[in-house]
Amino acid sequence: MPIDRAHLHRKYGPYVYGVGREDLRNFVAAVAGGVPGHAFASGAPEHAHPLTWDEDAARAGPHGGLVAPPGFAAAFAIEPFSQAVADPALGLDLVRLLHGEQQLEWLAPVRPGDRLETTGEITRIDAKPGLDVVEVTTSTVNQHGRVVVRGVWTAVIRSGDPSSSG
């Protein structure tokens, strides 16, 4: 059954995330070839960008300190999307749900010590043969009220009908 379009513009959040130095370095370790949870003991991962890992290099860099890499937004900005697809009011079958796409637009640096608030809104509900599509647009602001990341997250839900093309 298609998703009720009455849920279009349903809002989620705000969700608060405190950016910790260890969180940032563990993320960088995980994506740059290091060992998460051992970020400080194991040294810099081979592919870590100096502005995300090396405090001296980051202090001398354009942002004056460590900054989060682009993928780090998934640690905090995905929460409204997660809540939307799990919202019982929408009735989505999570077993049939695929995370179809995400787009992130960075507007300002995210740093250790930042307090981020992310809100989201369902901005698209479509039905295609064998598929439903839900899109959630998010906005994250820091403790200064500055928008740091905007995101668009897309879920694709396959039909429960085994004879459908999806």
Image (cartoon, rainbow, N blue to C red):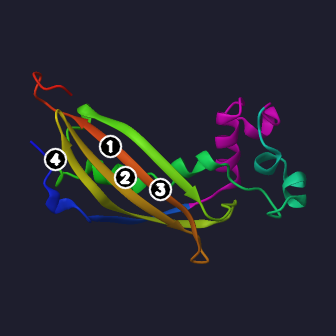
Does 48 sit left or right of 75 as displayed? right
Gap in Å between the C-alphas at discs 1 and 3?
13 Å
Does residue 71 sit above or below 5 in this rendering?
above
Question: Can you identify the residue that label 1 sits on?
Answer: 155
Q: Do the residues labelled 1 and 2 touch (CB within 8 Å)?
A: yes
Does residue 129 sit above or below 51 in this rendering?
above
Q: What quarter of the picture does the N terminus occupy? A: top left
Q: Furthest-bottom residue in view?
A: 144
Sooner in the amino-acid sequence: mark 2 or mark 3: 2
Please tell me whether mark 2 sits on a helix, a strand or a loop.
helix
Viewer-side residue, 26 vs 120? 120
Q: Furthest-top residue in view?
A: 163
Question: Residue drawn 90% across and 59% down?
Answer: 60
Residue 30 is one of the magenta-drawn residues: yes
Question: Can you identify the residue that label 2 sits on?
Answer: 81
Q: Do the residues labelled 2 and 3 touch (CB within 8 Å)?
A: yes
Task: Please give the label number shown on residue 120.
Answer: none
Gap in Å between the C-alphas at discs 2 and 4?
14 Å
Sooner in the amino-acid sequence: mark 1 or mark 2: 2
Q: What quarter of the picture does the C terminus occupy? A: top left
Between circles 3 and 4, the one closer to the viewer is 3
Q: In which quarter of the image is residue 43?
A: top right
Viewer-side residue, 46 vs 26? 46
Gap in Å between the C-alphas at discs 3 and 4?
23 Å
Give amino acid for label 3: Gly
Range of the magenta residues?
18-46
Question: Can you identify the residue that label 3 sits on?
Answer: 151
